[in-house]
Amino acid sequence: MTTHHDHIQMLRAELTSFHLSRRERRQIERELKEALARCAAERHDETAPA
């Protein structure tokens, strides 16, 4: 199973590829932004007082 951290690292690695079309790059950037937001939300939920 891939963790959020692993997924984020894979997306960042994909962005370093020279063979991406503009459409592919925008899609990966969008996925990365969403993954970072989910990760931040989960961290916030873990640190929120009960």
Image (tube, grey):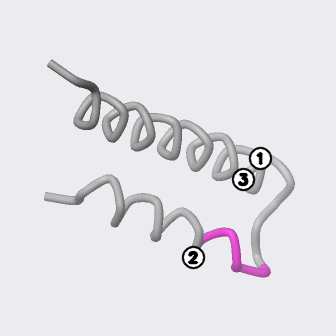
**Residues at discs 1 and 3 in contact (Cβ within 8 Å):** yes
* Residues under numbered marks 2 and 1 in contact, where contact means CB atoms less than 8 Å apart: no
What's the amino acid at mark 1?
Answer: Arg
Magenta stretch contains residue 47: no
What's the CA distance linking mark 2 and mark 3? Answer: 13 Å
Viewer-proximal residue, 27 or 3? 3
Q: Dot 2, how many residues are within 10 Å of its Cα: few (below 14), some (14-19), or many (20+)?
A: few
The answer to whether 42 appears left or right of 22 in the picture is left
Q: Badge 1 is on which residue?
A: 26
Q: Secondary structure beneath disc 3?
A: helix
Residue at point 45%, 40% (across, down): 40
Q: Is residue 45 above or below residue 5?
A: above
Mark positioned earlier in the residue sequence (2 or 1): 2
Label 2, secondary structure: give it: helix
Q: Which residue is mark 2?
A: 13
Q: What residue type is disc 2 on? A: Ala
| Picture coordinates of residue 20, whole percent (x, y) | 76, 67
How many labels, in total? 3
Q: CA distance from mark 1 to mark 3?
A: 5 Å
Q: What residue lies at 34% left-to-right and 66% top-to-bottom?
A: 6
Residue drawn 22% across and 59% down?
Answer: 2
Q: Is residue 28 left or right of residue 8?
A: right
Of the two numbered discs 2 and 3 in the rendering, the one whose residue sits closer to the viewer: 2
In this picture, is 42 found above or below 11? above
Place of residue 44 in the rendered image (x, y in percent of width and height, measured from the top left): 36, 33
Q: Residue 24: give its label.
A: 3
x, y percent for residue 41: 40, 31
Relative height, residue 25 to residue 26 (above, below): below
User: Residue 13: percent from the left, percent from the top?
Assistant: 57, 76
Span colored in magenta: 13-18
Residue at the spot x=48%, y=43% of the render? 35
